[in-house]
Image (spheres, rainbow, N blue to C red):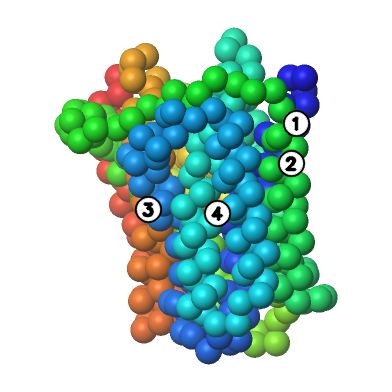
Amino acid sequence: MKNFTLSVIIYITIITLSLMYITQPLQPLFSKEFDVPIAKASFLTSIILLPLALAPIFYGYLLEKSSPKKILIFSLSCLGILQILISLVETYELFLGVRFLQALFIPAVLTTILTVLTRIDQQNIQKYVSIYVASGVVGGLAGRLFGGYFATVYSWQSAFLILGILVLLGAYLVSRLESSPRANLIKLTPRDILDHLQDRRYALLFFTVFILFFSFQAILNFLPFRAKELNPEIKESMIGLLYMGYAIGVVVSLLAGRITKWLGSKEIAIVFGLSIFALSTTLTLSSQFAWLIGSIFVLCAGMFIAHSILSSLTNSISPEKKGIVNGLYLAFYYAGGTIGSIAPGVIYKHFGWSAFALFVGGMLLFSASLFFCYRKLFR
């Protein structure tokens, strides 16, 4: 039964992350179809991230009295139905409204998945968290490739319809799992937040992860528009291929321990990852499509090196209140992603891709320099 539970969890993780990011390669298509500017089209992805930034603070109160199984069945059912409804909408406002409703259920799914995974085998929690991260990477890549391919060969509506059915299948599979106790999730209070932010180590870590995902979402969210700028005739399936580099996240996440050992410390490894990420932004300045694809491999390598080791370092500071620490880590992570998927678009719109890429690279270099200067806080 444990293997079946794990298989179901992997499936719903992949399908949920696919749902989150299926819109990303299609944003130029939506911009044209709904006759809205780039910034508005990007909202279709960024609106999904906002509740994830608030989830650690608010969702614990909502979920603590329900069993993980009931939460997953209800949330996945709502997500699947809403995904099917999106395939029927004809206006941007309705599309955005339904995506917002979906965004309210995604934190419940992802938070509960982690709860279930950590209960499968208490002696191998790190193993199952790694499986969750790898499944998320696969889901993010699958959603982008699937959306781009189906939009080109059939229609974007068919992609959303099929994905909605697959999400409903996930709800059915969860119904076949054994029941488990209530979630018992951590609730954050303002006092908890202030106590941890007053610790300079946590403040530096949370700032760094904010900049990290801000930069990651900035590049990936506006990359489709860059591809359209270089080649107005490019198909959505080709735009989807830009995200192939995302797959390297699985590899570097698993090699994070070896990279840390090679560089001598977690602090230097984080600076190394941030620096690689910053370097990759200059590669996106090329007007060659092949270079764009290659730049995303480098970008994702740097991103996931830094992300994996930042998470590990955050959890190594204190053995107590890990739920609160991880909740704040995720809150800053997704807050950065939400803002990064919208705000830098102003620079792109008014000053072009070169200024946009250099701005993101500059923020990463600043973050790397700051972390290097204060690395002794962790010793």
Say whether disc 4 or disc 3 marks the residue closer to the N-terminus.
4
Say whether disc 3 or disc 2 marks the residue closer to the N-terminus.
2
Residue on which the image places disc 3: 336
Quarter of the figure with residue 377: top left
Residue 22, image x, y percentages: 64, 62
Picture quarter with the C terminus: top left
Query: Callout 3, which amino acid?
Result: Gly
Residue 89, image x, y percentages: 61, 77
Say whether disc 3 or disc 1 marks the residue closer to the N-terminus.
1
Asked whether disc 1 touches disc 4, contact meaning CB atoms under 8 Å apart, the reply is no
Residue on which the image places disc 2: 172
Residue on which the image places disc 1: 176
* Side of 324 relative to 21 (left or right): left
Image point (49%, 55%), residue name? 103
Picture quarter with the N terminus: top right
Query: Callout 1, which amino acid?
Result: Arg
Image point (36%, 84%), residue name? 350
* Foreground label between 3 and 1: 1
* Foreground label between 4 and 3: 3
Cα separation, mark 3 vs mark 2, equals 34 Å
* Side of 55 relative to 112 (left or right): left
Asked whether disc 2 touches disc 1, contact meaning CB atoms under 8 Å apart, the reply is yes
Query: Callout 4, which amino acid?
Result: Leu
Query: Callout 2, which amino acid?
Result: Tyr
Local secondary structure at mark 3: helix
Local secondary structure at mark 4: helix
Residue on which the image places disc 4: 299
* Foreground label between 1 and 4: 1
Residue 343, image x, y percentages: 35, 68
Cα separation, mark 2 vs mark 1, equals 7 Å
Q: Nearer the viewer, residue 378 or 65?
A: 65
Local secondary structure at mark 1: loop
